[in-house]
Image: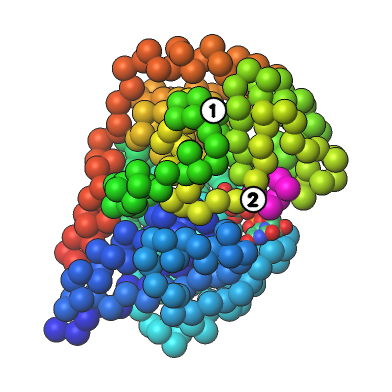
Amino acid sequence: MARKKILSVVGTRPNFMKTGPIQAALAQRDEEFDPVLVHTGQHYDTAMSDIFFEELGIGAPDHMLDVGSGTHAQQTARVMERLEPVLEAERPDLVLVPGDVNSTLAAALVAAKLGIPLGHVEAGLRSFDRTMPEEINRVLTDQVSDFLFTHSPEAEEHLLREGCAGEAIHYVGNTMIDTLVALRERIEAQGEVTARGLEPGGFVLVTLHRPALVDGALLEEAFRQLAGLAAQIPVFFPAHPRTRKNMERLGAAAAPGLEIVDPLGYLEFLSLLSAAAGVLTDSGGIQEEATFLGVPCFTLRDNTERPVTASMGTNVLLGLRPERIAEVPALIDEVRAREAKVPPLWDGAAAGRIVEVIARGI
Ligand code: UD1
């Protein structure tokens, strides 16, 4: 029997952790599957892209589209224009797209219009906030997908309500957690906390990159608050390039106890996260990783598409209200006293389940 060609499209930093384990699981069944990897180039700096390919052992992409940065329309259109000929030449049996970034939706549209079966990894997440570009990407990608791979208990209900077919929905678990489980020993051996001069359990890790927080006036207040927090407990902040640019515009800089560094690799970051007293973030993936690791997580957003991290895990929604950063030290103790749990099937074996569904289904 001919091998099935499975083509995955990745574009941004969090995509790499979600797709890496699927590539590995497909490679383990190489008599059945021929995996092909396309990188759109939405993220392109070494620290935002190449380092993850090396650390996660994904291997170089088979196709690089080099789309780079731009407006939403430019970025989406560029991925579509450049991916179409690749899909026409490769003619895969299935296209897989992870997450909710512009590359996800662009690739989904191209595959659907070429009539190629499509699978969405991380289907059914909803913030119900259409001012977030990611929410548009989620809803539309799910609408054109034939396989809806979910990792969150409430996802199925969202998908059914939007008219998706029940047979298309497969609760498989969380492939981002697969990466964490697979690399746990290396994360533990990384020793990043000591290397950075921090104390285990004695610092707050920060990541902020959403336009709603960093592109406008709230960033200034966030920095004022971070300086206040840093007077009580050391604060370590690897800054996304979008945030760095906005900081430069504001003239925001480090303060006593507040260290700002360039983006970190996966192992460095997870090594710090697992030993942090808590993490302050607006990222989606970090809410999940913190829940898995049992580390208190404070999310500076009005909503989350990952409510299970708050209802079962260690996440607290602070709202888009930087003034609440002042509450973090007290909240750390509160969350540590909670009986937090890891959601079902966040167990390191999600990618294997996806490949099993694919083997049965296409
Ligand atoms: C994108 C995703 C977001 C995700 C985030 C993860 C969309 C709409 N947004 O946001 O959902 O949470 O990735 O990191 O798809 N830049 C660089 N180097 C890079 C990449 C970006 O300097 O390698 C700078 C550029 O100035 C660029 C800006 O960051 O204009 C934003 O990049 P972009 O990919 O448009 O969005 P992100 O904010 O990274």
Residue 91: image location, x then y, percent: 38, 83
Residue at image point 48% right, 79% down: 63
The answer to if 242 sits in the magenta stretch is: yes
The N terminus sits in image quarter: bottom left
Q: How far apart are marks 1 and 2 (CA)?
A: 18 Å
Q: Mark 2 points at which residue?
A: 262
In front: 64, or 3?
64
Q: In which quarter of the image is residue 247?
A: top right
* Residue 129 visible (yes or no): no
Residue at image point 31% right, 46% down: 184
Against 318, residue 102 (above or below) is below
The residue tagged with tag 2: helix, strand or loop? loop
> Which contiguous range is marked in magenta?
240-244
* Residue 229 visible (yes or no): yes
Most frequent secondary structure within the magenta stretch: helix
Q: Mark 1 points at which residue?
A: 203
Give, as a three-letter code, the residue at label 2. Asp
Q: Quadrant of residue 306?
A: top left
Q: Is residue 14 left or right of residue 153?
A: right
Give, as a three-letter code, the residue at label 1. Phe
Residue at image point 22% right, 57% down: 352
Residue 72: image location, x then y, percent: 68, 58
The residue tagged with tag 1: helix, strand or loop? loop
